[in-house]
Amino acid sequence: MERTRRTVGGLVAVLIAATVLLCACSQRSGGSGGSSGPVDIFDTAIESPYDWGNLVWDGYGRVDYVADGQVRSRIGIDVSEHNGPIDWEAVADDGISFVYVRAAWRGSTEGGLYEDEHFEDYLTDAQEAGLDVGLYVYSQAMNADEGREEAEFVLDLLDGRPLELPIAFDHETTADYTGRSDNITSDACTAAARAFCDTIEEAGYRAVIYGNSYEFARMDILSFQRQGYWLAEYDDEPSVPLYLYVWQYSNQGSVAGIDSPVDMNIELVNALDE
């Protein structure tokens, strides 16, 4: 979200992520007693639970997941102050059903926490236009205390206001690997994410983990099955074998009411409904 994201084209990153995920899934399934099929949408499997042949692209950067003749997905976007002023009525009229708004971000050098410049107007205006809204926090947390601090920061901004969608923990390395949290251990990254999610959920909101395959591999990602996964991967279909809440499939979308390129997402939480 905050930089050009790595995709499956980054071979080293994908190999690392695949090794971590597949090994963890193998260890987890060893005592499963041979059970098959998903328990719920956030369970994991070695093979993808989705039939990606069900993806239907319209030629204009929009995609649906269609099974048994039914569309089982929704299209949405995510935005930050970098997208500038937005006409949310036009966004809604362009077929966008939901949006994740950046609520806050932590600096990658000094570590200060800041409110997104457009958080208030994006949240209010998007909800008034009829979109479902979730939030995300760009994290540079180095430990559990800082993960908790980030969650408390966004909760203070919300001040009890309702959300239709979860609040996402978005922990990223910087493009040049000079960020304050780029080299923290897997345990530290997992602890930061866990503290963030627990704090969000204790306040009555839902949490989700955002990242690409490289960033998922930096933490004990399978421990967040209950929260769910928002995957960033710019390709024809996801490659990570997880039950996905949302797939961010492009950062070059064109949406009415927004003058700049925008991140495009497909919500898959109902894709496997019978």
Image: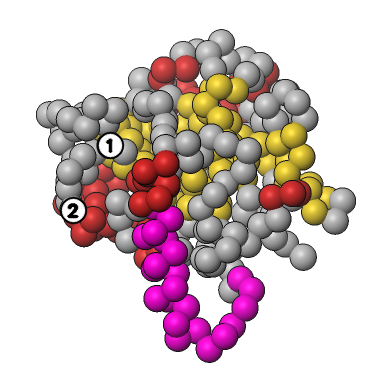
Note whether 27 is above or below 152 in the view shown: below
In-front residue for pair 220/132: 220
Please give left or right for residue 68 compared with residue 181 in the image. Answer: right
Q: Where residue 234 sits: x, y (%)?
A: 53, 34
In-front residue for pair 141/162: 141
Residue denoted by label 1: 173
- Residue sticking out furthest to the left: 110
Note whether 138 is above or below 143 in the view shown: above
In the image, what residue occupies the spot 69% across and 50% down?
52
In the image, what residue occupies the spot 24% across and 52% down?
189
Determine if residue 196 is in view.
no
Q: Where residue 51 sits: x, y (%)?
A: 70, 55
In-front residue for pair 173/124: 173
Please give left or right for residue 134 compared with residue 110 in the image. Answer: right
- Residue sticking out furthest to the right: 69
- Of the 4 image quadrants, the one containing the C terminus is bottom right
Q: What is the spatial separation of the Cα atoms under label 1 and label 2, in whole angstroms?
A: 12 Å
Residue denoted by label 2: 185
Q: Residues within 10 Å of mark 2 (few under 14, many from 20)?
A: some
Quarter location, residue 214: top left
Q: Which numbered dot is residue 238?
A: none
In the image, what residue occupies the spot 62% across and 78% down?
36
User: Helix, strand or loop at disc 1?
Assistant: loop
User: Helix, strand or loop at disc 2?
Assistant: loop
Q: Is residue 216 magenta?
A: no
In magenta, the rendered stretch is 17-38
In the image, what residue occupies the spot 42% across and 47% down?
14
Q: Amino acid at mark 1?
A: Thr
Q: Are marks 1 and 2 in contact (CB under 8 Å)?
A: no
Q: Where residue 165 sits: x, y (%)?
A: 53, 46
- Residue sticking out furthest to the bottom: 33
Quarter location, residue 103: top left
